[in-house]
Image (spheres, rainbow, N blue to C red):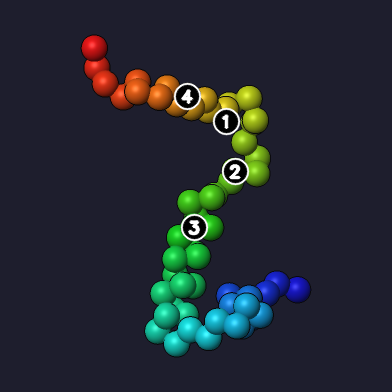
Amino acid sequence: MTLSIKDALAARGVSPSAEELTKIEAKWAEIVALKGDLGNIAIDDADISLRNIPGGDHVG
């Protein structure tokens, strides 16, 4: 059984208006569409590296 967005929010004590609920559902549909088919991607093709160098944001 899947929880609806309305049920999930109600469980947390949040009661959005009908207009807000429509917007939330539309945004959730966008997120799900962006996620797409990531479950089937080869993990070796999905690696990313990010490095933070303090003070390294200048060009010199």
CA gap, disc 1 to disc 4? 17 Å
The residue singled out by tag 3 in the image is 31
Query: Which circle's residue, 2 or 4, is located before the other in the chain?
Result: 2
| 21 vs 42: above or below | below
- Residue at position x 58%, y 46% in the image: 37
Q: Secondary structure at mark 2?
A: helix
Image quadrant in which you'd find residue 7: bottom right
Q: Secondary structure at mark 3?
A: helix
The residue singled out by tag 1 in the image is 46
User: Do we see residue 46 in this rendering?
Assistant: yes
The residue singled out by tag 2 in the image is 38
The residue singled out by tag 4 in the image is 51
CA gap, disc 2 to disc 3? 12 Å
Which amino acid lies under the numbered mark 1 shown in the image of this protein?
A: Ala
Query: Which circle's residue, 3 or 1, is located before the other in the chain?
Result: 3
Which amino acid lies under the numbered mark 3 shown in the image of this protein?
A: Ile
Task: Where is residue 16? Give x, y as percent.
Answer: 48, 84
CA gap, disc 3 to disc 4? 27 Å
